[in-house]
Image (cartoon, grey):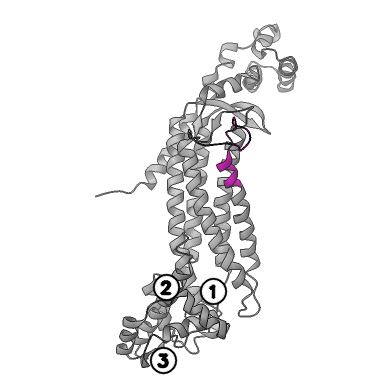
Amino acid sequence: MAGIWSEESKLARWLEVELAALEGWAEVGAVPAADIAEIRAKAVPPSVERVAEIERVTDHDTAAFVDAVAEQLGAEGRWFHYGLTSSDVVDTALALQIQDSGRLIGEGIERSFAAVVARAEEHRHTICIGRSHGVHAEPITFGWKLAGWAFELDRARGRLARALESNRVGQLSGTVGTYAQVDPEVERIACERLGLEPDPVSTQVIARDRHAELLSALALIATSLDRFATEVRHLARTEVREVEEPFGREMKGSSAMPHKRNPKVAERICGLARVVRANALVGLENVPLWHERDISQSSAERIVIPDSFLALDYMLDRFSWLVEGLVVDPERMRRNLDASHGLVFSHRLLLALVDSGLPRDDAYRLVQKHAMRAWEEEADFAELVRGDPDIAGRVDLGAVFDLDATVRHVDTVFDRLHALVEEEEPVHA
């Protein structure tokens, strides 16, 4: 990812766009094909140092690049950058960098998705407590929780694909985009060779709503990872300790406290998500430009687009590592579930009483009376209920307090997950 956004790579992409444009000119017969062949044979990406040296004089990076390439060429060099303006080269090359980066992000999502699916299947029946507001609610399975992450990663995959397709456009339309000095056929030919589509209307720049959509998609992916990592952090707290990050024998969790095993990778993911989200706001701010174009977006996006890709690439790598090696403690999960003294069955008891013919509010108040006592006195909820003839004589308490029955539909979710995985698997002849 760093290579894609290096200065060397940028200049190589700029040259690729320039050569594609020249081949377009040759194909429409406006420039001698022999001259273009000579240029292609001689032209190589100039060094970053040489471009910077010229730019100190020209105070214009694209002009410096053009001069640095042209000085490699002979008389044929007069055709280099023919009919183009800076944004034709910069914006089209940026589209190529975005496509390259998007492929790497896609690979990161695929690895993360595969890791989550594998661990979800592993813990399909690992019962743990589901929490709302941070308070015990009802039982779920850890695999169920992870399955939700997998579906969210699939949605992230779709958002990324749509944003990349929206940015798979180039422009070779000249100043203010009117094709006054460029044949539209040159643009079509060049974009086709670069694997892009011509922007239907470019105003010397490609409209930045495309880039805002991209940055928003990257921010949403980062935010999903933030959500998953936040869950790991909560579950890794000492008072909970249902999961732990991988911890090697020689690792140190603290410079001062030898006992520490902190969820530092999850915290790192959460922190970087804030950066990627902030960058998405810059992308939105970059959309309104003056008239046909200005360059107020240029300085900002030279930071936020590469940084968002770099940060997210790293986040996905660390997230997949985290999931693959996550230490899960089913026994601790069960102890935590039992810590609320059976209160997780209050809803099942409420419904059983309603089924028995008791008015809902009466049933609610009856259950709540025992639930509050169990809560405040740390008494066993089931024992309190069994001692109340108004309840014990009306319902089958064995069925009410059946833990497995609370997660009996877990296979429904996994059937949906398996269908998604099978849909994504390539078919080989």
State the residue at coordinates (50%, 89%).
180
The disc labelled 3 sits on which kind of residue?
A: Arg
Residue under pointer 1: 206
Q: Which residues are magenta?
A: 252-270
Hey, which residue is sitting farthest bottom in the picture? 75
Residue under pointer 3: 78
Whether label 1 touches label 2, CB < 8 Å: no
Disc 1, SS: loop
Q: Nearer the viewer, mark 3 or mark 1?
A: 3
| Image x and y of residue 355, in percent | 63, 19
**Taken as a whole, is the magenta stretch helix, strand or loop?**
loop
- Inspect this view and state whether residue 33 appears: yes
The disc labelled 2 sits on which kind of residue?
A: Ala
State the residue at coordinates (71%, 22%).
360
How far is the residue under mark 1 from the one under mark 2?
A: 20 Å
| Image x and y of residue 240, in percent | 61, 28
Q: Callout 1: few (<14), some (14-19), or many (20+) C-alpha neighbours within 10 Å?
A: many
**Residue 269 lies within the magenta run:** yes
How far is the residue under mark 3 from the one under mark 2?
A: 20 Å
Task: In the rendered view, tell whether residue 178 sits above or below residue 249.
Answer: below
Disc 2, SS: helix
Which of pointers 1 and 2 lies earlier in the amino acid sequence?
2
**Residue 239 lies within the magenta run:** no
State the residue at coordinates (42%, 87%).
71
Q: Which mark is residue 12?
A: 2
